[in-house]
Amino acid sequence: MGMRLELGALLRRLLKEEGGAVLILYALLIPVIIGIIGLAIDGGRVFIVNSELQNLADAAALAGAAELDGTADGMTAATEKALHLLNNDPRWSNVVVEGSQIQQPRFCSSPLNRKVPWDPWKACNPTSDPKEADFIEIITVRRDVSPIFMAAVGATSNVGSKAIAIAGTSTVACNVQPLMLCNPQEPNEFSATPGQMFVFKQKGGGVGTHPTYVPGDFGLLDPPGQDSSTGPELKNLLSQQSPKFCYVNEVSPRPGQASGNVDTGINVRFDEHPNGNTDGLDLTPAPNVIKGFKPHNKGSCWPLDDLGTVARLPRDTAFTDVGTTEIGTQRPSTADLNAYWQYHHGSDWPLDSTTSAPMTRYQAYLQEIGMEEEDWLADTEKSVPFCAPANLLDKGTAERRILDVVIVDCTSQDVHGNATTNVRSNKYAEFFVTEPSSNGTVYTEFERFLTVDDDDSKLHKIVQLYR
């Protein structure tokens, strides 16, 4: 009887004892706490790996896009930069992957494929044509994180991630004249030699027609955002050295001849001014307006006496016709060059100090700008303009006789007058106007290609991420 009472008392004491409950609670919660810590740490490592991969994809896409220039070499350079220049190994991935961290890039004609917007791994419209490849798509390889803390609660599977980025490039040409030359050497890249003469004649076909443009054709462009500009508007734009607009990657041809407007827009540079309304026309003359004519009456602007070919910059002596353009194949003879310089300055044509070859016409023009009045023989045409408004007589710079012309592959893009708009091109060339325009024909000398972000700041490249 007494033993039963003592046993009952002991059981009641044990039921009331709370000293060991905490140990039991800890035994139950420790796996849960370890799981939460492991999930936070291992999950954070996966998040960091994803961020590292995204940074790598973004950097590779930007580096590749910067090389895209509309040529096959540009695509090759873009691939090289994306695959090999930026080959970072994500530090938080503890599963080694040999080789490139980036899959083979794809090139795109647009940054997003609207047909599959739900699939992030088929984002761009792929193209293999370098002339259409304005975008590059980068997808990284999958990088895994093997669990460390989660392994303590039985997790064994790796967790991985990959990233995608698309970057594109835009070529922006600002303050250029609305002029276009169909690449005379298509399908090859256009090339020319400084000093080579190009005689530009406008492509025929009136507004509303759709003439086919072929290599060598020369024509006018609509200003950005327009598809049917007027002749007077183009006249004003042609007269300006730095029209206030920018072309972004694309231009739109304007069909039809506008000979009179072209003549007026070009010839103000030679101190020739039209009668009538001149609103919007830049009447600033170049500092050297030699053209082989001089006023019939001293001090007057009109009429002019023709001094003959000896008094104006000599033309090339042989040409080949390509489209509507004549391209010089033989430079002026030494006799023609010397005759010009003898007529105006009493000595032979100057030589280039670097090459010892005869100066180009543009080099000679620049040299003449720096000559004093006594360096010109008496009774010849003077280089200094005097017919322009008085407030513009000393405002023109040497570049006043330079035209910026966009080079377009017209055949591959099937250019048909204003039926074809938004024609892609990012190549611009400078041409020196050697004499006044007549009937819309412009005599020029090739000088150089515009390069991105050069001193003139007319051509720019913008590279940006699209996703």
Image: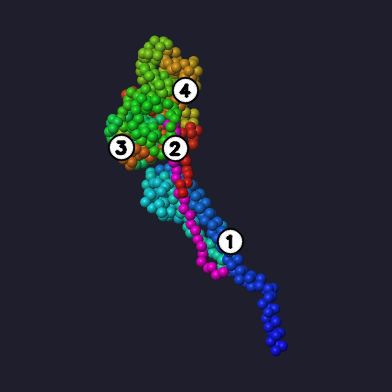
Position of 257 with respect to 2 (left or right) is left
Nearer to us of marks 1 and 2 is 1
Pointer 3 or 4: first along the chain: 4
- From the image, tell me which residue sits under label 2: 172
Q: Position of residue 463 (x, y in %)?
A: 47, 43
Pointer 4 or 2: first along the chain: 2
Q: Amino acid at mark 4?
A: Gly
Q: Secondary structure at mark 1?
A: helix
Q: Amino acid at mark 3?
A: Ala
In the image, what residue occupies the spot 42% across and 11% down?
299
Q: In the picture shown, does residue 439 fall above or below 213?
A: above
Q: Which mark is residue 217?
A: none
Measure the C-alpha gap from mark 3 to mark 4: 38 Å
Pointer 1 or 4: first along the chain: 1
Pointer 1 or 2: first along the chain: 1
Magenta segment range? Answer: 153-176
Inspect this view and state whether residue 326 appears: no
In the image, what residue occupies the spot 52% across and 56% down?
50
Q: Secondary structure at mark 3?
A: helix
Residue 205, picture quadrant? top left
Nearer to us of marks 2 and 3 is 3
Counting the numbered discs, the total is: 4
Q: Which mark is residue 41?
A: 1
Which sits in the foreground, 289 or 307?
Answer: 289
Q: Position of residue 232 (x, y in %)?
A: 36, 25
- From the image, tell me which residue sits under label 3: 419
In the image, what residue occupies the spot 49% across and 16% down?
373
Q: Amino acid at mark 1?
A: Ile
Q: Are marks 4 and 2 in contact (CB under 8 Å)?
A: no
